Amino acid sequence: MRASPLNLAIALGVLGIIAAQLLLGHPYAGLFTAFAVVLTLGLQRRPPAEQAGTVDNPAELRRSRREIVGAFEIERRRIERDLHDGAQQYLVAATMKMGEVSLGLDPDSPEGRLLSAAQEDAGRAMKALRETVHGIHPQVLTDMGLEAAVRDLADRFDGVEVRCPHPLPSLPSGITASGYFFVSEALTNAAKYGGPAVVLLAADSSLHITVTDRGPGGAVIRPGHGLSGMRERLAAFGGSLEVSSPQGGPTEVRARMPLLLNVGESGYVCD
């Protein structure tokens, strides 16, 4: 199969990024590698209509997008496990040993003050690592589901209220993760521009997530920015993202992902 110039350009560009990350010893090089493998296979296996930009089978396009999202999610979880079971455990052990040493030192001595400063540094490192792990894939999302993870996320912002009038059904991991990172992006934007926000979670035949803030309005989805990327991720599950943000506010960002479409047409059965 002959690759088009566009395919070759994309593949070479991605391989260049990977080469640079590997040479620099980037800790997340595996994430770039997973992306490259899936992207290259997708480019070579796309039907002619899709390569030409005229897709006649939306379900097939959603399936291809889900494969890419799935590859990223697998690598994301692997990185989270490696950080949690590796670096974080070493930091915990080091902190405990420093605590034992401090018992035999005068806290006002030069050695005691130096050890105290080292303990504070280790504590800050632990906090930073936990925040990094949480941003990659929060464990609460896997253990307790979307509502609990969103409430945990809301606690990291000022004045955020989470409403979930009815218990959410069991959701596939892809939809759960997409919903969580949509809320994370929307709350980050609200914190920058709109102030306190309200998150509403609901489900019927679709999962509905609405984030509303009382900011000045005027928000738009710009190509290449966070919400634009989230719209693409939601589309992988047949979902959509809409923004209502009149001048003067409020700003309302809505995500919807179908749950009860036919098998193969949504992410419902695709863990």
Image: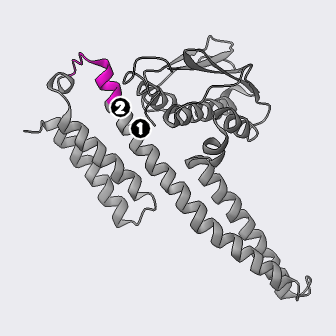
Q: Nearer the viewer, residue 200 or 173?
A: 173
Q: Position of residue 129 (x, y in %)?
A: 63, 59
Disc 1 to disc 2: CB gap under 8 Å: yes
Residue to which mark 2 is pinned: 65
Image side of residue 253 versus residue 73, left or right: right
Give the amino acid type for the residue marked by disc 1 in the picture. Val
Mark 2, secondary structure of its residue: helix
Looking at the rendering, the stretch of residues picked out in magenta corresponds to 53-63
Q: Position of residue 231 (x, y in %)?
A: 46, 25
Residue to which mark 1 is pinned: 69
Mark 1, secondary structure of its residue: helix
Give the amino acid type for the residue marked by disc 2 in the picture. Arg
Taking the magenta stretch, the answer to whether it contains residue 61 is yes
Q: Quadrant of the N terminus?
A: top left
Q: Quadrant of residue 113?
A: bottom right
Image side of residue 23 versus residue 256, left or right: left
Q: Quadrant of residue 46?
A: top left
Q: Residue at x 79, y 75 (%)?
A: 117
19 above or below 177?
below
**Coloring basis for residues:** one colour
Q: Position of residue 195 (x, y in %)?
A: 73, 28
Q: Quadrant of residue 147?
A: top right
Image side of residue 10 versus residue 136, left or right: left
**Cα gap from disc 1 to disc 2, whole angstroms:** 6 Å
Residue 211: numbered disc: none
Taking the magenta stretch, the answer to whether it contains residue 94 is no
Q: Nearer the viewer, residue 32 or 67?
A: 67
| Crowd band around label 1 with a 10 angstrom C-alpha radius: few (<14), some (14–19), many (20+) | many
